[in-house]
Amino acid sequence: MTIGHHLDALHGLPAYTFPGPEHRPRPVEPDAVAWRVSADVYDANENWTDAFARFCATVDITRVRALAVGAWEEAYDTDPTSVIEALTAARDRFPALRALFLGDMVGEECEISWTNQTDVTPLLAAFPRLEELGVRGGSGLRFPALSHGALRRLVIETGGLPAEVVRGVGGSDLPALEHLDLWLGTPEYGGDSEAADLAPILSGARLPNLRHLALRNSEMQDAVAAAVASAPVVARLEVLDLSMGVLTDEGAAALLGGQPLTHLKKLDLHHHYLSEPLLERVRQTLEPAGVEVALDRGDAEEDAEDDGTVWRYVAVGE
Protein backbone atom coordinates (compact mmCIF):
# COMPACT_ATOMS: atom_id res chain seq x y z
CA MET A 1 0.00 0.00 0.00
CA THR A 2 1.12 3.56 -0.63
CA ILE A 3 -0.01 6.88 0.82
CA GLY A 4 -3.18 7.82 -1.02
CA HIS A 5 -4.43 10.94 0.73
CA HIS A 6 -2.99 14.23 1.89
CA LEU A 7 -3.44 15.26 5.49
CA ASP A 8 -7.01 16.25 6.18
CA ALA A 9 -6.15 17.94 9.47
CA LEU A 10 -3.17 19.11 11.52
CA HIS A 11 -3.12 20.39 15.09
CA GLY A 12 -6.88 19.93 15.21
CA LEU A 13 -7.41 22.24 12.24
CA PRO A 14 -8.82 21.26 8.84
CA ALA A 15 -6.24 21.25 6.08
CA TYR A 16 -6.47 23.88 3.34
CA THR A 17 -4.19 24.00 0.31
CA PHE A 18 -2.80 27.41 -0.55
CA PRO A 19 -3.76 27.91 -4.22
CA GLY A 20 -1.29 28.09 -7.07
CA PRO A 21 -0.31 31.41 -8.67
CA GLU A 22 -3.07 31.17 -11.27
CA HIS A 23 -5.82 31.13 -8.62
CA ARG A 24 -6.93 33.79 -6.17
CA PRO A 25 -7.15 32.43 -2.58
CA ARG A 26 -10.63 32.43 -1.14
CA PRO A 27 -11.03 34.35 2.13
CA VAL A 28 -9.84 32.14 5.00
CA GLU A 29 -9.03 33.14 8.55
CA PRO A 30 -5.29 32.47 8.94
CA ASP A 31 -5.69 30.72 12.28
CA ALA A 32 -8.73 28.63 11.29
CA VAL A 33 -6.98 26.11 9.02
CA ALA A 34 -3.79 24.13 8.65
CA TRP A 35 -2.18 25.60 5.54
CA ARG A 36 -0.60 23.32 2.97
CA VAL A 37 2.01 24.93 0.71
CA SER A 38 3.31 22.86 -2.17
CA ALA A 39 4.84 22.85 -5.63
CA ASP A 40 4.75 20.24 -8.37
CA VAL A 41 7.21 17.38 -8.11
CA TYR A 42 7.45 17.01 -11.89
CA ASP A 43 8.03 19.94 -14.25
CA ALA A 44 7.25 22.55 -11.61
CA ASN A 45 6.38 26.01 -12.91
CA GLU A 46 6.87 27.45 -9.42
CA ASN A 47 9.35 26.02 -6.94
CA TRP A 48 8.42 25.55 -3.30
CA THR A 49 10.37 28.50 -1.95
CA ASP A 50 8.64 30.83 -4.41
CA ALA A 51 5.25 29.40 -3.40
CA PHE A 52 6.17 29.95 0.24
CA ALA A 53 7.20 33.54 -0.44
CA ARG A 54 3.88 34.16 -2.17
CA PHE A 55 2.09 32.56 0.80
CA CYS A 56 3.92 34.83 3.24
CA ALA A 57 3.02 37.88 1.15
CA THR A 58 -0.65 36.92 0.84
CA VAL A 59 -1.63 35.53 4.26
CA ASP A 60 -1.30 37.14 7.67
CA ILE A 61 1.30 34.60 8.75
CA THR A 62 1.54 36.07 12.25
CA ARG A 63 -1.72 34.19 12.91
CA VAL A 64 -0.85 30.87 11.21
CA ARG A 65 -0.92 28.02 13.73
CA ALA A 66 -0.30 24.96 11.54
CA LEU A 67 1.65 24.53 8.31
CA ALA A 68 2.09 21.46 6.12
CA VAL A 69 4.89 21.38 3.58
CA GLY A 70 3.56 19.53 0.58
CA ALA A 71 5.51 18.50 -2.50
CA TRP A 72 8.68 20.24 -3.50
CA GLU A 73 10.19 20.03 -6.96
CA GLU A 74 11.93 16.73 -7.77
CA ALA A 75 11.38 15.36 -4.26
CA TYR A 76 12.48 11.94 -5.53
CA ASP A 77 15.93 13.42 -6.23
CA THR A 78 16.15 16.57 -4.08
CA ASP A 79 16.06 16.90 -0.30
CA PRO A 80 14.15 19.75 1.41
CA THR A 81 17.21 21.71 2.55
CA SER A 82 16.00 24.85 0.78
CA VAL A 83 12.53 24.34 2.28
CA ILE A 84 13.93 24.11 5.80
CA GLU A 85 16.15 27.13 5.20
CA ALA A 86 13.16 29.18 4.04
CA LEU A 87 11.13 28.14 7.08
CA THR A 88 13.87 28.84 9.58
CA ALA A 89 14.66 32.19 7.97
CA ALA A 90 11.01 33.18 8.46
CA ARG A 91 10.73 31.95 12.05
CA ASP A 92 10.28 35.41 13.58
CA ARG A 93 7.32 36.03 11.28
CA PHE A 94 5.42 32.98 12.61
CA PRO A 95 4.92 33.70 16.32
CA ALA A 96 1.76 31.58 16.52
CA LEU A 97 3.07 28.51 14.68
CA ARG A 98 2.59 25.36 16.76
CA ALA A 99 2.54 22.53 14.19
CA LEU A 100 4.67 21.62 11.16
CA PHE A 101 4.47 18.65 8.82
CA LEU A 102 7.25 18.11 6.32
CA GLY A 103 6.47 15.98 3.25
CA ASP A 104 2.67 15.86 2.89
CA MET A 105 2.87 13.97 -0.40
CA VAL A 106 0.84 11.10 -1.82
CA GLY A 107 2.17 8.21 -3.89
CA GLU A 108 1.32 9.85 -7.20
CA GLU A 109 3.55 12.78 -6.28
CA CYS A 110 6.39 10.81 -4.70
CA GLU A 111 6.33 7.41 -3.01
CA ILE A 112 7.11 7.53 0.69
CA SER A 113 10.35 5.57 0.31
CA TRP A 114 11.49 7.67 -2.65
CA THR A 115 11.01 10.95 -0.80
CA ASN A 116 14.34 12.53 0.08
CA GLN A 117 14.73 14.02 3.52
CA THR A 118 17.56 15.60 5.49
CA ASP A 119 18.29 16.74 9.04
CA VAL A 120 14.94 18.05 10.26
CA THR A 121 16.03 19.17 13.72
CA PRO A 122 16.80 22.77 12.61
CA LEU A 123 13.02 23.20 12.53
CA LEU A 124 12.81 22.40 16.23
CA ALA A 125 15.71 24.71 17.01
CA ALA A 126 14.08 27.54 15.04
CA PHE A 127 10.64 27.07 16.60
CA PRO A 128 11.10 26.47 20.34
CA ARG A 129 7.34 26.72 20.93
CA LEU A 130 6.45 24.11 18.31
CA GLU A 131 4.12 21.48 19.74
CA GLU A 132 3.80 19.10 16.77
CA LEU A 133 6.29 17.92 14.17
CA GLY A 134 5.50 15.42 11.45
CA VAL A 135 7.86 14.07 8.80
CA ARG A 136 7.11 11.75 5.86
CA GLY A 137 9.92 9.97 4.04
CA GLY A 138 13.04 8.28 5.38
CA SER A 139 15.67 8.49 2.63
CA GLY A 140 18.51 10.64 3.94
CA LEU A 141 16.54 11.51 7.09
CA ARG A 142 18.56 12.61 10.10
CA PHE A 143 17.44 13.43 13.63
CA PRO A 144 20.42 13.96 15.95
CA ALA A 145 19.58 13.97 19.65
CA LEU A 146 18.35 17.30 20.98
CA SER A 147 16.36 18.96 23.73
CA HIS A 148 13.00 20.63 23.14
CA GLY A 149 10.72 21.71 25.93
CA ALA A 150 7.44 22.26 24.08
CA LEU A 151 7.08 19.39 21.60
CA ARG A 152 4.04 17.27 22.45
CA ARG A 153 3.64 15.19 19.30
CA LEU A 154 6.30 13.68 17.01
CA VAL A 155 5.35 11.58 13.98
CA ILE A 156 7.86 10.10 11.53
CA GLU A 157 6.30 8.14 8.68
CA THR A 158 8.61 6.03 6.54
CA GLY A 159 8.88 2.82 4.58
CA GLY A 160 12.26 2.38 6.28
CA LEU A 161 13.45 4.38 9.29
CA PRO A 162 17.24 4.55 9.69
CA ALA A 163 18.58 3.23 12.99
CA GLU A 164 20.46 6.50 13.40
CA VAL A 165 17.12 8.34 13.55
CA VAL A 166 15.65 5.87 16.06
CA ARG A 167 18.68 6.38 18.29
CA GLY A 168 18.49 10.15 17.84
CA VAL A 169 14.87 10.25 18.96
CA GLY A 170 15.67 7.94 21.86
CA GLY A 171 18.56 10.16 22.94
CA SER A 172 16.49 13.36 22.86
CA ASP A 173 15.16 15.10 25.95
CA LEU A 174 11.49 15.75 25.20
CA PRO A 175 9.82 16.35 28.56
CA ALA A 176 6.49 17.53 27.10
CA LEU A 177 6.12 14.75 24.50
CA GLU A 178 2.81 12.92 24.83
CA HIS A 179 2.51 11.23 21.43
CA LEU A 180 5.33 9.43 19.59
CA ASP A 181 4.66 7.62 16.31
CA LEU A 182 7.52 5.93 14.44
CA TRP A 183 7.03 3.91 11.22
CA LEU A 184 10.04 1.59 11.37
CA GLY A 185 9.60 0.01 7.94
CA THR A 186 11.79 -2.58 6.23
CA PRO A 187 15.49 -3.04 5.41
CA GLU A 188 14.71 -2.84 1.69
CA TYR A 189 13.87 0.83 2.17
CA GLY A 190 16.53 1.74 4.72
CA GLY A 191 14.90 0.50 7.92
CA ASP A 192 18.03 -0.94 9.51
CA SER A 193 17.12 -0.54 13.18
CA GLU A 194 16.89 -3.42 15.64
CA ALA A 195 14.68 -3.80 18.68
CA ALA A 196 17.67 -2.91 20.88
CA ASP A 197 17.75 0.56 19.31
CA LEU A 198 14.36 1.23 20.89
CA ALA A 199 15.62 0.70 24.45
CA PRO A 200 16.01 4.42 25.35
CA ILE A 201 12.46 5.09 24.15
CA LEU A 202 11.05 2.07 25.94
CA SER A 203 12.73 3.06 29.19
CA GLY A 204 10.73 6.29 29.15
CA ALA A 205 13.45 8.09 31.08
CA ARG A 206 13.51 11.11 28.76
CA LEU A 207 9.79 10.97 27.99
CA PRO A 208 8.03 11.53 31.33
CA ASN A 209 4.74 12.62 29.76
CA LEU A 210 4.44 10.01 27.02
CA ARG A 211 0.92 8.59 26.83
CA HIS A 212 0.62 7.38 23.22
CA LEU A 213 3.38 5.21 21.76
CA ALA A 214 3.22 3.86 18.21
CA LEU A 215 6.00 1.63 16.89
CA ARG A 216 4.49 0.37 13.69
CA ASN A 217 4.75 -0.53 10.01
CA SER A 218 7.66 -2.79 10.95
CA GLU A 219 8.99 -6.01 9.49
CA MET A 220 10.46 -6.86 12.92
CA GLN A 221 7.16 -6.41 14.74
CA ASP A 222 7.53 -9.63 16.75
CA ALA A 223 10.82 -8.42 18.20
CA VAL A 224 9.30 -5.02 18.91
CA ALA A 225 6.36 -6.63 20.71
CA ALA A 226 8.72 -8.76 22.80
CA ALA A 227 10.71 -5.66 23.79
CA VAL A 228 7.56 -3.73 24.63
CA ALA A 229 6.33 -6.57 26.85
CA SER A 230 8.79 -5.63 29.60
CA ALA A 231 9.27 -1.94 28.78
CA PRO A 232 8.98 0.46 31.76
CA VAL A 233 7.29 3.15 29.64
CA VAL A 234 4.24 0.94 29.04
CA ALA A 235 2.93 1.37 32.59
CA ARG A 236 2.18 5.04 31.94
CA LEU A 237 0.73 4.66 28.43
CA GLU A 238 -2.90 5.11 27.48
CA VAL A 239 -2.49 3.98 23.87
CA LEU A 240 -0.08 1.36 22.55
CA ASP A 241 0.06 0.99 18.77
CA LEU A 242 1.92 -1.94 17.18
CA SER A 243 -0.11 -1.90 13.99
CA MET A 244 0.69 -2.02 10.26
CA GLY A 245 3.54 -4.50 10.60
CA VAL A 246 4.41 -8.18 10.41
CA LEU A 247 3.05 -9.19 13.83
CA THR A 248 2.58 -12.95 14.19
CA ASP A 249 1.49 -15.25 16.98
CA GLU A 250 5.05 -15.23 18.35
CA GLY A 251 4.99 -11.49 18.98
CA ALA A 252 1.44 -11.39 20.28
CA ALA A 253 2.15 -14.23 22.72
CA ALA A 254 5.22 -12.41 24.00
CA LEU A 255 3.18 -9.25 24.47
CA LEU A 256 0.45 -11.04 26.39
CA GLY A 257 3.02 -12.89 28.47
CA GLY A 258 4.66 -9.68 29.66
CA GLN A 259 3.43 -6.98 31.97
CA PRO A 260 -0.32 -6.37 32.27
CA LEU A 261 -1.87 -4.19 29.59
CA THR A 262 -5.29 -3.83 31.20
CA HIS A 263 -4.62 -0.20 32.14
CA LEU A 264 -4.55 0.82 28.47
CA LYS A 265 -7.39 2.69 26.85
CA LYS A 266 -6.49 1.21 23.46
CA LEU A 267 -4.24 -1.43 21.94
CA ASP A 268 -3.96 -1.11 18.17
CA LEU A 269 -2.77 -4.20 16.29
CA HIS A 270 -4.54 -3.68 12.97
CA HIS A 271 -2.85 -5.13 9.88
CA HIS A 272 -1.49 -8.27 11.55
CA TYR A 273 -0.80 -11.95 10.86
CA LEU A 274 -2.37 -13.50 13.96
CA SER A 275 -4.25 -16.76 14.10
CA GLU A 276 -7.79 -16.85 15.40
CA PRO A 277 -6.74 -18.49 18.71
CA LEU A 278 -4.30 -15.63 19.40
CA LEU A 279 -6.90 -13.05 18.43
CA GLU A 280 -9.29 -14.62 20.90
CA ARG A 281 -6.63 -14.56 23.63
CA VAL A 282 -6.10 -10.85 23.04
CA ARG A 283 -9.83 -10.19 23.21
CA GLN A 284 -10.40 -12.26 26.34
CA THR A 285 -7.41 -10.74 28.12
CA LEU A 286 -8.10 -7.08 27.42
CA GLU A 287 -11.68 -6.39 26.42
CA PRO A 288 -13.23 -7.38 29.80
CA ALA A 289 -10.96 -4.74 31.38
CA GLY A 290 -12.40 -2.10 29.08
CA VAL A 291 -9.45 -1.89 26.68
CA GLU A 292 -10.41 -0.99 23.12
CA VAL A 293 -8.60 -3.44 20.85
CA ALA A 294 -8.16 -2.83 17.12
CA LEU A 295 -7.71 -6.21 15.41
CA ASP A 296 -8.74 -5.60 11.82
CA ARG A 297 -6.48 -7.69 9.58
CA GLY A 298 -6.99 -5.33 6.67
CA ASP A 299 -4.94 -6.20 3.59
CA ALA A 300 -2.35 -8.25 5.51
CA GLU A 301 -2.35 -11.24 3.18
CA GLU A 302 0.33 -13.92 3.06
CA ASP A 303 2.01 -15.20 -0.10
CA ALA A 304 3.21 -18.81 0.06
CA GLU A 305 5.66 -20.35 -2.41
CA ASP A 306 5.85 -24.00 -3.45
CA ASP A 307 8.89 -24.56 -1.22
CA GLY A 308 6.96 -23.47 1.85
CA THR A 309 8.39 -19.96 2.05
CA VAL A 310 5.78 -17.51 3.37
CA TRP A 311 6.01 -13.80 2.56
CA ARG A 312 4.41 -11.22 4.80
CA TYR A 313 4.39 -7.45 4.29
CA VAL A 314 4.12 -4.22 6.19
CA ALA A 315 1.18 -1.94 5.40
CA VAL A 316 3.23 0.86 3.76
CA GLY A 317 6.47 -0.01 2.01
CA GLU A 318 7.20 1.67 -1.27
Image (cartoon, grey):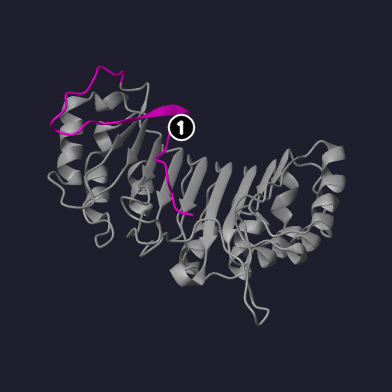
Q: Circle 1 is placed at which residue position?
A: 11
Q: Amino acid at mark 1?
A: His
Location of residue 105 in the rendering, given as x and y in whole percent from the top left corner: 35, 47
Q: Is residue 47 magenta?
A: no
In screen coordinates, is 221 left or right of 157? right
Residue at 70% in and 61% down: 225
Q: Is residue 17 magenta?
A: yes
In screen coordinates, is 128 left or right of 80? right
Numbered-mark total = 1
Judged by its main secondary structure, the magenta piece is loop
Residue 228 in the image: above or below residue 187: above
Residue 107 in the image: above or below residue 25: below
Q: Quadrant of residue 115?
A: bottom left
Residue at 69% in and 60% down: 273
The crowding category of the residue bearing disc 1, from other C-alpha atoms within 10 Å (few below 14, some 14 to 19, many at least 20), is some
- Which residue is more in the foreground, 202 or 283? 283
Find the magenta span and give its range.
1-29
Judged from the image, the secondary structure of the residue bearing numbered disc 1 is loop
- Which residue is more in the foreground, 206 or 303? 303
Residue at 41% in and 50% down: 135
Location of residue 253 in the rendering, given as x and y in whole percent from the top left corner: 80, 61
Residue 274 in the image: above or below residue 180: below
